[in-house]
Amino acid sequence: MALCRTVRRTGLTGRSRRPTPDSLVSPLDRSPPHGSAGTGRAGHNSVGDRVTEALAVRSGTPAPRQATRRTPGTVDVLALVTDAYGARGGIGLYTRDLLDALAQSGHTARVLPRNVTGPLEPVPPTVAFDTRSAAGPVAFVRRALAQIGTRPDVLLCGHLNLLPLAALLARATGARLVLGIYGIDAWTPSARRGVGRALRHVDAVYSISAFTQERFAAWAPVARARSFLLPNAIHLDRYAAGPKSDALLDRYGLRGRRVLMTTGRMSATERYKGFDETLAALA
């Protein structure tokens, strides 16, 4: 994985975690890790490596941490995210894939989600998922500020809107700050207070697409060399070509026709997703 080999190169190490309270998800006695090795999840073995390589190559080599009781060469991550486990939508899935990939490479993460909207998927043993932070905006800030006494290697900011708080924590803990960007959230300068100033503290940026990467680079005060692509993973064990359903072909009169299937929100306020153009082209 990419948040992984770089740490071995830089000498970044972390500190052992304190015992997690009951409100933290503890999957050790619940479920096996989600998406264990060999499930056919494309790109899963390169995610962590790309992030850590970005930290070393694009941000310079930081001084090694003083003491650690963890395995040498592993990364300790503190992540502020909009959603991950127990969430719907693309960003939630993307974040789960990233955290799963980090865990599979032997790294540890403490995750503070802004939202938890459904049942939790299996959480890897080395990921402490603090559901208390999803109780509301005040709870999220309180749980984040409670991390100031910790010493993570990397502060992973899962959304541009969370960057002001993430930058504060990164400075307070001495962690490297890594920002994730996805789409329209990063295409134009953010109107959210504090984002512009916080961007000056970002060490590396990962983007879900080249288009978003270029749009972000056009306005953000972050060196282009510090950004890199980290596309969506594909769950080959869940999504793959298969035989067409005779029942659906007959129901919708699709025999002998080419079928285009897409999923996503259809909203008048989010027409940038392109569904309207696709429908017009097919008409």
Image: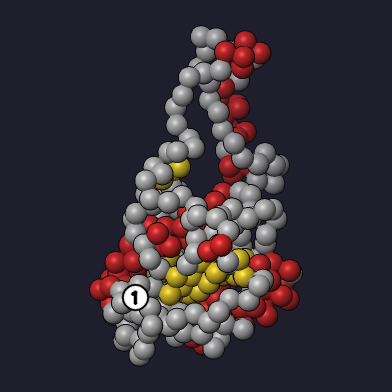
Residue 218's quadrant in the figure?
A: bottom left
- Can the viewer see residue 123 in this picture? yes
Q: Amino acid at mark 1?
A: Thr
Asked if 238 appears above or below 151 in the picture, the reply is above
Asked if 214 appears above or below 173 in the picture, the reply is above
Relative depth, front residue between 168 and 101: 101
Give the residue drawn at x 46%, y 84%: 151
Q: Position of residue 159 (x, y in %)?
A: 56, 64
Residue at the front extreme of this rendering: 29
Seen in the image, is 56 located left or right of residue 101?
left
Which quadrant of the figure contains the C terminus? Answer: top right
- Can the viewer see residue 133 in this picture? no
Give the residue drawn at x 56%, y 62%: 29
Residue 149's quadrant in the figure?
A: bottom right
Asked if 173 appears above or below 124 in the picture, the reply is below
Give the residue drawn at x 51%, y 9%: 256
Q: Position of residue 225 (x, y in %)?
A: 32, 66
Which quadrant of the figure contains the N terminus? Answer: bottom left
Q: Which residue is mark 1?
A: 71
Q: Secondary structure at mark 1?
A: loop
